[in-house]
């Protein structure tokens, strides 16, 4: 039996008997260095959060500077210039008015869910309490966020803790922005609309991962579908929660994935790339109109009483502020659109052509994925992961889906090196 006091996340610990954890000594840009001195390309941005790579000097400096004056204080009854500046920047970027702070993605989503429910209670609509999500959705691992996730692997054991949620079927998945369905998903929408109409009466909110479903298999779907969904929500007094934990802060080539569809949500959740994964921070943003519902004398018990000890950690906020500045100064979005995306796309198509082992390539911005064709083993993706580690890349496929989601500023030579490793790993698995 492999025995260690560390119980690793999202892992069957028995797997570690034959593949022990990689002992990391340091990390810089898009590379991890192991204790052995070997280097690995961080092809998945360490669970999708290292938007600007590891050890960015400007982020480091921002934290060191902040460390000299204020690390963290309770955010109830206090404020500070750092959190005020970050709040202003986030409202600017998202066109929202109010920001609630937490520490991880699941909590930010749960805040949006709780806030939408409480808004209904205050509005005298307690029976409007249902959630609808999309087929293959993933929104986190707390009980509420698992309840609106559609992935049995993560939720089946906890059914007794969870509440019911309906899932919109037949999502119009696309290969990318050039796919005809990206611009016109009327047929799929009409089907979804009749499904939604059946549930409208009791429906509180629809929750989506805009444009790309991450844990569900890096599935890109139609912007036209989201646009129509957003309109339907407005027309039917249904809240729209945009879970941008993975897609937000530039991952799809725009600051928010919602921008592809040019719609407004009632709640937006951000985390991961917000601090470039340096410190834990998440936010839930909403509008003035929602804020006003809760605003009253204390005795009316309308206050939103949710809190976390580390809400609005000042060091993490200074870190996020520097990330947003770097995006501006280093033209990160332009780099994603003009260099990162086309290079990854070309490389993935080349691998597919050379190996004949991939199909269903889909991509947008700094995300590209493909499925292993006729997998030889149940866990072919896991075998490719093991081969890739030996060759110099941390890939960690989702089932039999291979994907790259490297830091958004990954250099072209690194992307090309990653492509060679991926090709060899596929041929060797
Ligand atoms: C879309 C989405 N929502 C929520 C989460 C949960 O975030 P966290 O792992 O920080 O709790 C994730 C994590 O991968 C995610 O991809």
Image (spheres, rainbow, N blue to C red):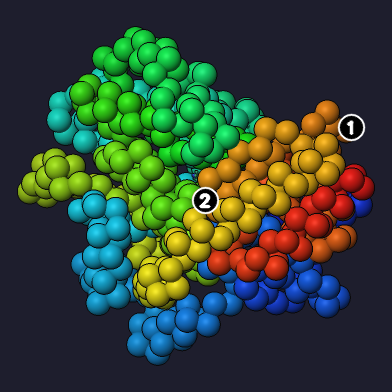
Which residue extends farthest bottom?
Answer: 68
Mark 1, other Cα within 10 Å: few <14 / some 14–19 / many ≥20 = few
Task: Give the CA distance from mark 1 to mark 2.
Answer: 30 Å
| Residue 5 visible within the image | no
Seen at 92% across and 47% down, the residue is: 428
Residue 411 vertical placement versus 428 (above, below): below
Seen at 46% across and 65% down, the residue is: 332
Q: Does the residue labelled 1 lie within 8 Å of ligand 1?
A: no
Which residue extends farthest left?
Answer: 297
SS assignment at label 2: loop
Which of the two discs, 1 and 2, sits closer to the camera?
2
> Looking at the image, which is closer to me, 77 or 37?
37
Seen at 79% across and 52% down, the residue is: 422
Q: Which mark is residue 403?
A: none
> Looking at the image, which is closer to me, 95 or 183?
183
Q: Where is residue 17 in the image (x, y as percent from the top left)?
A: 90, 52
Q: Left or right of 378: which side holds 330?
A: left
Q: Position of residue 374 (x, y in %)?
A: 83, 28
Earlier-in-chain disc, 1 versus 2 = 2
Seen at 32% across and 26% down, the residue is: 228
Residue 149 vertical placement versus 290 (above, below): above
Q: Left or right of 233: which side holds 1?
A: right
Q: Where is residue 250 in the image (x, y as percent from the top left)?
A: 45, 56
Which quadrant would residue 300 be assigned to in this image? top left
| Residue 247 visible within the image | yes
Which residue lies under the disc numbered 2?
A: 365
Quadrant in which the C terminus is drawn:
top right
SS assignment at label 1: loop
> Looking at the image, which is closer to me, 339 or 172?
339
Which residue lies under the disc numbered 1?
A: 376
Q: Position of residue 270 (x, y in %)?
A: 41, 53
Mark 2, other Cα within 10 Å: few <14 / some 14–19 / many ≥20 = many
């Amino acid at each position: 039996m492999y025995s260690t006091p560390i119980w690793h996340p999202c892992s069957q610990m028995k797997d570690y008997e034959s593949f022990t954890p990689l002992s990391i000594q340091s990390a810089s840009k898009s590379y991890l260095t192991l204790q052995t001195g070997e280097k690995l390309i961080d092809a998945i941005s360490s669970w999708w959060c290292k938007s600007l790579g590891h050890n960015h000097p400007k982020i480091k400096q921002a934290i060191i500077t902040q460390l000299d004056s204020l690390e963290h204080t309770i955010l109830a009854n206090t404020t500070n210039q750092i959190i005020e500046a970050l709040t202003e920047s986030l409202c600017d970027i998202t066109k929202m008015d109010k920001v609630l702070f937490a520490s991880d993605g699941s909590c930010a989503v749960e805040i949006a869910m709780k806030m939408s429910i409480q808004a209904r209670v205050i509005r005298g609509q307690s029976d409007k309490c249902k959630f609808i999500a999309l087929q293959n959705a993933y929104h986190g691992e707390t009980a509420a966020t698992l309840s609106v996730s559609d992935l049995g692997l993560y939720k089946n054991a906890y059914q007794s803790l969870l509440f019911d949620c309906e899932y919109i079927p037949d999502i119009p998945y696309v290969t990318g922005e050039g796919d005809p369905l990206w611009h016109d998903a009327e047929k799929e929408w009409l089907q979804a609309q009749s499904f939604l109409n059946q549930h409208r009466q009791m429906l509180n909110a629809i929750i989506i991962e805009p444009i790309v479903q991450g844990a569900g298999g890096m599935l890109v779907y139609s912007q036209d579908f989201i646009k129509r969904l957003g309109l339907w929500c407005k027309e039917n007094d249904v809240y729209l929660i945009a879970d941008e934990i993975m897609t937000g802060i530039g991952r799809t080539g725009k600051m928010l994935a919602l921008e592809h569809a040019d719609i407004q949500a009632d709640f937006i959740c951000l985390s991961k790339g917000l601090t470039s994964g340096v410190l834990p921070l998440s936010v839930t943003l909403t509008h003035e109109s929602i804020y006003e519902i809760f605003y009253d004398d204390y005795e009316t018990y309308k206050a939103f009483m949710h809190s976390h000890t580390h809400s609005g950690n000042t060091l993490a906020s200074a870190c996020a502020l520097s990330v947003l500045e770097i995006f501006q100064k280093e033209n990160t979005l332009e780099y994603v659109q003009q260099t990162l995306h086309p290079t990854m796309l070309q490389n993935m198509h080349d691998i597919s052509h050379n190996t004949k082992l991939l199909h269903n390539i889909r991509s947008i911005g700094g995300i590209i994925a493909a499925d292993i064709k006729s997998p030889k083993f149940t866990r072919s993706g896991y075998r490719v992961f093991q081969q890739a580690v030996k060759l110099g890349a941390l890939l960690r496929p989702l089932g039999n889906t291979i994907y790259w989601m490297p830091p958004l500023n990954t250099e072209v030579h690194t992307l090309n090196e990653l492509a060679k490793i991926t090709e060899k790993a596929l041929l060797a698995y």
